[in-house]
Amino acid sequence: MKVIDFHVHVGLKEHWHSWVQEFQQSVGSDYYKRYEELSKPEGFAEYIKQHGIEKAIILAEYSPVTTGVVTNDYVLEFCEGRDCFVPLASINHFLTSDPAGELRSLFSRGFKGVKLYPSYHYFYPNDREVYPIYGVAAEHGFPVMVHTGSSVFRGARLKYADPIHLDDVARDFPGLKILLVHGGRGIWYDTAFLLSRIHENVYLEVSGLPPQNLLKYFPDMEKNSSKIVYGSDWPGVVTIGENIERLKRLPISEEALTQILYSNAKRILGP
């Protein structure tokens, strides 16, 4: 069964704050056990191949208050020349005078989407100051990933992470592909699930959630399998492979698994 992992962080240890490193180490991530190998593009490319992953969506991040900074330049260089990696940009609209212009430039350089971090950057996702970012992504047909739900990292502010704010965005940008990252983790599972049901352009992304618990969070998961996208949240997991195997053991159909692990992501990414 083919797999696309829609949520992968890369970087060097020094890119992340100490509390982020402590969390990653606490889960026993392979990243720390095999750091010299897996922090390099060639080593990580081989690693995901060994675990049956066709493509990994590689995320930049500008969150200096909460997690750290993995620059767009770093991610683009990491992905360069490797078809198994798909780079997604990070825009922190508080740190640039022209978010829309910067995103257009990043797309022209090879990025295939953008991720926003409302609870890390302190803004509501339906804030009109962010709308130019959505507009540029919609123009290009590229997806926008938006962090929703809880976070264990210092400085994160939960009030900005309610997925209900994406209802406005989905209606105002009906052609924009929106992924609710972490599926509203913690207190908004139902809200995130409902939004993915009622909006054709909204998807439920399940990274950072224990795969064995997904049916507890989303009892009607199989009915909505055409709108659910797999992600690991590496290196916040032990191994990417074990995460996938746990999901495969859920009592859902092979058709649903194929959609969640591969075909939905393939459709979002496009040709």
Image: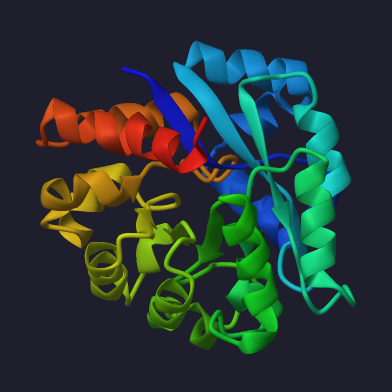
Q: Position of residue 228 (x, y in %)?
A: 31, 48
Q: Residue furthest front?
A: 139
Q: Is residue 170 above or below residue 221?
A: below
Q: Is residue 12 visible?
A: no
Q: Of residues 39 and 8, which is closer to you in this image?
A: 8
- Residue drawn 65% across the image and 55% down it: 114
Q: What residue is rendered at 77% in x and 59% in y?
A: 103
Q: Is residue 267 above or below residue 130?
A: above
- Count of labels shown? 0
Compare residues 87 and 26 and report the one nearer the observer: 87
Q: Quadrant of the N terminus?
A: top left
* Residue 23 screen position, x and y as percent: 60, 54
Q: Position of residue 226 (x, y in %)?
A: 24, 45
Residue at the image point whose x is 52% and y is 68% from the top: 151
Of residue 18 and residue 64, the one placed in the foreground of this image is 64
Relative side of 76 to 21, left or right: right
Residue 248 in sight from this viewpoint: yes
Query: Residue sitting at 66 percent across and 78 percent down?
Result: 130
Instruction: Using the rendered view, name the quadrant where residue 33 is placed.
Output: top right
Colouring scheme applied when the structure was drawn = rainbow
Q: Say above or below: 123 vs 234.
A: below
Residue 126 rendering spot, x and y as whole percentages? 54, 84
144 lies left or right of 212:
right
Residue 262 shown left or right of residue 234 in the figure:
left
